[in-house]
């Protein structure tokens, strides 16, 4: 429907001729009389912004005095009248934006295209005929003033004066460029009158090239202005339509039927705030509470319908769409119980903020969020000795290998919080490095950092970095960690996990780093995979090197981390989004889980505690059955396990175990002063045997011969059980 059709009948719905419903116009009546003027002003603002954006895009998003002071206003003086007239001709100052459609956007594109064609014609006309418009005396005056400024710059006696003169010179340069574009023909003709190698000819040719570049830049600005004008005007109209549809639509959809778990203070506060706001998004049906005394009671007229075990029946009976768990102090077991009881129902789960956030005033009870798998698997907050960690990191140059990975990037975030002197981000993959660098620069602008592309197996490059930057603390997180992939690429596992670790450790020793912490894995305990076995060899080398080095070398072992690249949770989420099935290797497979921030914090705590040579083991809590994790993720996504989303068992993959062995209790464990960190007691190999074995392993790795690699690893790690 066109704008003209929509605006014919004042006081009627556009294009229908019927009286408008009450409340259709949401502008004050006084402003409606000046509606056309307001629309023209909105167009005027968009035209100015569009030209500004076009200049920014043409000059690589840099606001330069060269174009901002003179070129932008001069072009704007031509753009505004041309566009106002053309858009008026296309009847763009009438119509109801709340009904904007595809035909209106097409009209905007047409008007913008015609405007750009006219402006480009004016620009080309000026290039050929501008010498009749701009007098020579004006250009001569600018040239004289620029020479005068250059002389003053040479004689400037203060930085402030020098800056002012340079700014004025830059301004005049931009003005002179745009004025002299019309004289390019004369300049090149004058150049041809001088000898080929003469200084005068070279200067004139150089000036012609500069003006040609200015001409192309302005042409680019006009073309970019076409796109930015369409983008801004279309975006503005769509925002107006979105505003009306989202906030004033009479058919925004029916309210979701809502159940609150927890008839305590938080549940009452949540209901009270919903009733006060008359929130049309939710219709609160009732409460759920395990306290028998509360069942059958009412809070603000809303009944307590039953306990948690009765949830599925209550949800079916009352057609519940969403459950809010209003128990700020709820631990993961309580949250899991609610979710597990509701398995088989298509519900959305929300939870209120923590007691700490509510008490501090940081968040309100009504600021709910979706229950996440981290809530079900998460653990108690880690208590750290911050003073100890700060003493270890503050004011030092820290190097993190694998800085773009899940653990490495989180290590960088944690390190930055303790005020290092500098942070060196070492990573082989450029894209992850680019993104973590951008994030850190935004969040920690005061931390000096260097992003370094480096393959840790490249000794020359590693030594170059260590010799130039002299890192004091090294956090070695780089490794190949994907078990089945490393089974198929055993030589690469050896090169990256063993040779890479040896290269980094040797460089730290040679260039006098004070401490190195290597991040290892629970799969190094009685390994059944090549990946786990190579990490065990790396641990042994680190321990052995610590015996004779002034550098303190420590190792930290932990299990799976939630949400890391390639881990089970993101894979399950992708499979659920695709409609299933969710693939689990075995019904009895169990894994330890820890959040990435928790693991990173405990790594720093262990590193600060280490005296050198220890293999620290982090407390991973209780193992979780992977099939239960899959069911809970499906339920949290609003689907029914086995009905909406199937669970398929694919069988153990090469190198995988049913159970990981990682515990901080037992005869082979020594407790530390931190309750979640223990030290593994072991008897290290003698240096000669170890190093000969590593040399043999590295020499056979290049062959990618799986059998030979396994045989060589077994010499170093007798407990390695290859599947």
Image (tube, rainbow, N blue to C red):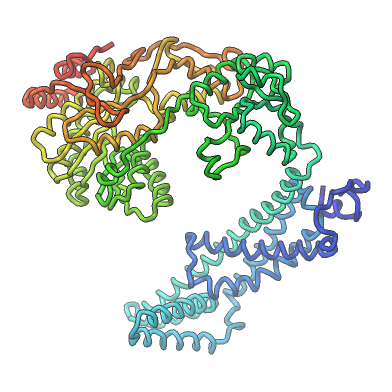
How many numbered markers are drawn? 0
Residue 349 placement (x, y as % from top left): 60, 27
Q: Is residue 453 visible?
A: no
Vertical placement of residue 696 versus 46, above or below: above
| Residue at the image point whose x is 49% and y is 60% from the top | 61
Relative side of 237 to 7, left or right: left
Vertical placement of residue 319 versus 123, above or below: above
| Residue at the image point whose x is 64% and y is 20% from the top | 346
| Residue at the image point whose x is 29% and y is 28% from the top | 677
| Residue at the image point whose x is 28% and y is 17% from the top | 529
Task: Please identify the quadrant where the C terminus is shown.
Answer: top left
Residue 480 placement (x, y as % from top left): 30, 29
The front one of 590 and 109 is: 590
Vertical placement of residue 452 versus 254, above or below: below
Relative side of 374 to 123, left or right: left
Relative side of 542 to 89, left or right: left
Residue extending farthest to the left is: 688
Residue 62 placement (x, y as % from top left): 47, 63
Residue extending farthest to the front is: 293
Relative side of 451 to 53, left or right: left
The front one of 102 and 132 is: 102
The front one of 122 and 269 is: 269
Residue 546 placement (x, y as % from top left): 13, 34
Q: Is residue 556 visible?
A: yes
The front one of 103 and 592 is: 592
Q: Quadrant of residue 34?
A: bottom right
């Amino acid at each position: 429907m066109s704008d003209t059709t929509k605006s014919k009948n004042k006081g009627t719905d556009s294009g229908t001729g019927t009286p408008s419903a009450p409340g259709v116009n949401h502008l004050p009546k006084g402003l409606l009389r000046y509606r056309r003027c307001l629309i023209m002003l909105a167009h005027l603002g968009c035209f100015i912004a569009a030209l500004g954006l076009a200049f920014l895009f043409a000059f690589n998003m840099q606001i330069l005095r060269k174009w901002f002071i003179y070129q932008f206003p001069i072009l704007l003086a031509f753009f505004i009248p041309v566009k106002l007239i053309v858009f008026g001709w296309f009847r763009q100052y009438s119509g109801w934006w709340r009904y904007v459609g595809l035909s209106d956007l097409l009209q905007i594109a047409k008007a913008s295209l015609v405007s750009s064609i006219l402006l480009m014609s004016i620009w080309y006309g000026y290039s050929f005929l501008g010498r009749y418009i701009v007098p020579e005396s004006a250009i001569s005056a600018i040239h004289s003033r620029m020479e005068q400024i250059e002389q003053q710059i040479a004689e400037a006696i203060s930085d402030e004066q020098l800056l002012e003169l340079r700014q004025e010179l830059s301004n005049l340069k931009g003005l002179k460029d745009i004025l002299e574009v019309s004289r390019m023909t004369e300049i090149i003709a004058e150049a041809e009158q001088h000898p080929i190698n003469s200084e005068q000819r070279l200067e004139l040719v150089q000036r012609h090239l500069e003006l040609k570049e200015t001409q192309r830049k302005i042409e680019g600005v006009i073309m970019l202005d076409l796109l930015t004008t369409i983008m801004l005007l279309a975006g503005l109209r769509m925002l107006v339509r979105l505003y009306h549809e989202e906030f004033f639509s009479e058919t925004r959809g029916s309210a979701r039927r809502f159940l609150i778990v927890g008839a305590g203070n938080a549940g009452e506060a949540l209901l009270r705030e919903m009733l006060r706001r008359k929130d049309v998004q939710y219709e609160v049906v009732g409460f759920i509470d395990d306290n028998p005394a509360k069942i059958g009671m009412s809070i603000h007229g809303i009944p307590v319908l039953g306990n948690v075990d009765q949830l599925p029946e209550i949800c079916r009976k009352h057609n519940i769409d969403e459950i809010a768990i209003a128990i700020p102090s709820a631990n993961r077991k309580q949250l899991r119980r609610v979710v597990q009881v509701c398995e088989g129902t298509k519900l959305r789960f929300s939870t209120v903020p923590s007691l700490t956030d509510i008490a501090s005033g940081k968040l309100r009870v009504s600021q709910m969020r979706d229950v996440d798998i981290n809530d079900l698997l998460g653990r108690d907050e880690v208590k750290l000795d911050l003073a100890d960690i700060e003493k270890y990191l503050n004011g030092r140059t820290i190097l993190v290998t694998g800085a773009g990975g899940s653990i490495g990037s989180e290590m960088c975030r944690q390190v930055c919080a303790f005020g290092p002197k500098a942070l060196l981000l070492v990573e082989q993959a450029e894209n992850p490095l680019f993104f973590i660098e951008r994030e850190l620069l935004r969040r920690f602008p005061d931390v000096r950092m260097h992003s370094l592309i480096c393959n840790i197996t490249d000794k020359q490059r590693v030594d170059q970095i260590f010799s130039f930057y002299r890192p004091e603390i090294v956090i070695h997180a780089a490794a190949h960690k994907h078990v089945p992939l490393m089974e198929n690429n055993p030589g690469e596992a050896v090169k990256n996990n063993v040779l890479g670790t040896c290269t980094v450790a040797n460089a730290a020793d040679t260039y006098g780093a004070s401490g190195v912490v290597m991040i290892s894995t629970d799969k190094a305990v009685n390994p059944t995979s090549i990946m786990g076995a190579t990490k065990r060899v790396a641990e042994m080398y680190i321990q052995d090197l610590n015996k004779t080095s002034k550098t303190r070398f420590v190792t930290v072992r932990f299990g799976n981390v939630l949400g890391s690249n390639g881990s089970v949770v993101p894979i399950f989420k992708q499979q659920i989004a695709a409609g299933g099935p969710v693939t689990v290797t075995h019904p009895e497979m169990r894994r330890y889980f820890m959040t990435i921030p928790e693991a990173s914090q405990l790594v720093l705590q262990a590193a600060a505690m280490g005296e050198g040579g220890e293999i620290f083991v982090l407390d991973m809590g209780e193992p979780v059955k992977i099939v239960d994790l899959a069911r809970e993720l499906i339920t949290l996504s609003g689907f029914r396990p086995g009905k909406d989303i199937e669970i398929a068992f694919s069988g153990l993959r090469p190198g995988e175990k049913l159970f990981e062995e990682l515990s901080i209790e037992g005869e082979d464990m020594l407790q530390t002063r931190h309750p979640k960190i223990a030290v593994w007691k072991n008897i290290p190999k003698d240096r000669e045997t170890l190093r000969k074995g590593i040399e043999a392993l590295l020499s056979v790795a290049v062959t990618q011969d799986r059998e030979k690699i396994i045989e060589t690893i077994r010499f170093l790690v007798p407990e390695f059980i290859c599947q």
